Amino acid sequence: MSNRFAQELAMFATCAMVFSGCSTGVTDDTELGSRESAVTLGGHLAGITDADFTAAQANFNQVETIDDGVGPIFNEFACGRCHTLGAIGGAGEQIERRFGKVVNGVFSTQSSGGGSLRQLQSLGAFTSASGASCNVAVEHEPTDATVHNVGRLTTALFGIGLVDAMPDTFFTSLVAAEPAAVRGIVNHAAITLPNPADASQNIGTVRVARFGWKADTSNLADFAAGAYLNEMGITTQHCFKGTSITAFATESKPNGVAVAPGCDDLAPPAPPGIPAGTDDAVGVCAANQTELQDDIQNFLTFMTFLAPLPRDLSDLISINAGAPVFNQIGCNGCHVTTTFRTPNPAPNGVPGNFAFNPFSDFAVHDMGTLGDQIGQDGDSVAVTRRMRTAPLWGIRFRNHLLHDGRAADVPSAVLAHDGQGKAAATAFGNLSPTDQHNVVQFVRSL
Ligand code: HEC
Ligand code: HEC
């Protein structure tokens, strides 16, 4: 028996003891999920060795430079520079910036102006590999933008591989069972970069989009390659069943204008047959070759096996009093208390039949004035108000809440709920101070 397994057994016993002493309040479902959570903050699920997880984690934390391909514009030098709170992979303090433009009720990302993400840093002045003078300007918001300076706070990745393992039908039936007034909409998106471990994924496979504040990305491989490009300016190329994937191989254009050749960064030139400007390539794809670029594979591995955080049951009296109130005032209409359970075997290699409780339906809801008004090209204004139900697990490790980090504590986050979340926010506001405290303690225990 490995040490890790022994630890998990010990945890199981402790929780069972804690719960045998408590009454109703915390449901059986929630109890199950907590038993199977990781003991060590930032530790890993079964299915990977300590050494492999540590190596993948180190890559996630690796600071990259202009020589590795950072630039021309970027937000940070490492995934682990933003995803920090609680443990590596946590939420963060960095708030990114987005903009857009609405014309005749239709949203535009202003892609010709570099939208909708405004990267916060640029390489500035440097000498290219061939000796040319480069000077990359920092992006600015286009003057004709109508949606300004929208913040996006870094989200936590604990347990996210379990979410990636869930089949589409789980999410659609979850949402179908929600009360009509708060019912969410399940987003779908085609996969650009399939996870080679999951046989159900292919290029273009449409899957429930469950990741990101807007639930616009359908698997973790896509998110990893997109983040490497958009957050760090590192472009990659991959092979899937013999097809070369170049969707992440084009450098960002600051405010829509491509930098001069050689001024994107100082990474070695792409190998023959691969688009120029690709910082990290697998190479020309042989027949049936499937291979993610190394860093992306490591990010995917790290995130897949990063375990959920343990619950904090230190204030059990308030927690047990708050749990039923959370349901009575309708929080569970979106932050569902349903226990998720991974398929057995799970398609991406996480443990099968693993119970967990993220307290989100991973669907989007019309949040009225709280919606961030950012969308995809062609979205109506109503669509831009939709936000993914924020998962509440591990929230006690956060120091800012809501998509733009505007709330410093749980009550202010709740009171800002508008649109489909308005009734629950009002009900929360009408609770006695004791009941409010108990709901907050319940939320902070998850
Ligand atoms: C500059 C800070 C920053 C860096 C660097 C960064 N992220 Fe993030 N990450 C964010 C923000 C902000 C979000 C929320 C984005 C959104 O939903 O619009 C996020 C969200 C995510 C999510 C979605 C989680 C969810 O809640 O569904 C994943 C996965 C992710 N990041 C992976 C990565 C990986 C892998 C890297 C490194 C290649 C990385 N991130 C680098 C800031 C960062
Ligand atoms: C209609 C669906 C809905 C209902 C009902 C709802 N929420 Fe939310 N909740 C959301 C969405 C969507 C977000 C993300 C909003 C944003 O940041 O723009 C969110 C965010 C939060 C956050 C901040 C999480 C974070 O990661 O920053 C907390 C805390 C929260 N909700 C608690 C509650 C509580 C407590 C209740 C009951 C009073 C409740 N919610 C009711 C949909 C809902």
Image (tube, helix red, strand yellow):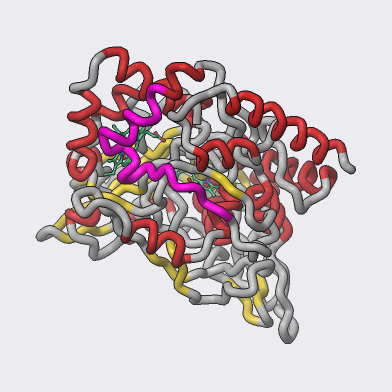
Image vertical order of residue 211 relative to residue 317, above or below: below
Q: Is residue 77 visible?
A: no
Please name the residue shown 72% across and 31% down the image.
13
Numbered label tally: 0
In-front residue for pair 195/438: 438
Side of 98 where 200 appears, left or right: right
Question: Relative to 272, does residue 51 appear above or below in the rendering?
Answer: above
Q: Position of residue 10 (x, y in %)?
A: 76, 31
Q: In front here: 52 or 37?
A: 37
Q: Nearer the viewer, residue 188 or 33?
A: 33
In the displayed structure, would residue 125 be above or below residue 14? below
Residue 326 is situated, as x and y percent measured from the top left of the image, at 34, 31
Residue at 51% across / 45% down in the picture?
74
Is residue 18 left or right of 73 when viewed as pictured?
Answer: right
Q: Quadrant of residue 37?
A: top right
Q: Nearer the viewer, residue 399 or 43?
A: 43
- In terms of image quadrants, where is residue 403? top left
Q: Is residue 94 shown to the viewer in this render?
A: yes
**Which quarter of the rendered image does ligand 2 occupy?**
top left
Q: In the rendered structure, does residue 259 fall within the stretch colored magenta?
A: no
Taking the spot 83% from the left edge, 48% from the top edge, the residue there is 49
Identify the magenta region.
321-341
> Which residue is painted at 59% across and 69% down in the image?
194
Residue found at the far top of this picture: 433
Vertical comparison of 224 with 417: above or below: below
Q: Residue furthest bottom?
A: 287
158 left or right of 396?
right
| 326 within the magenta span | yes
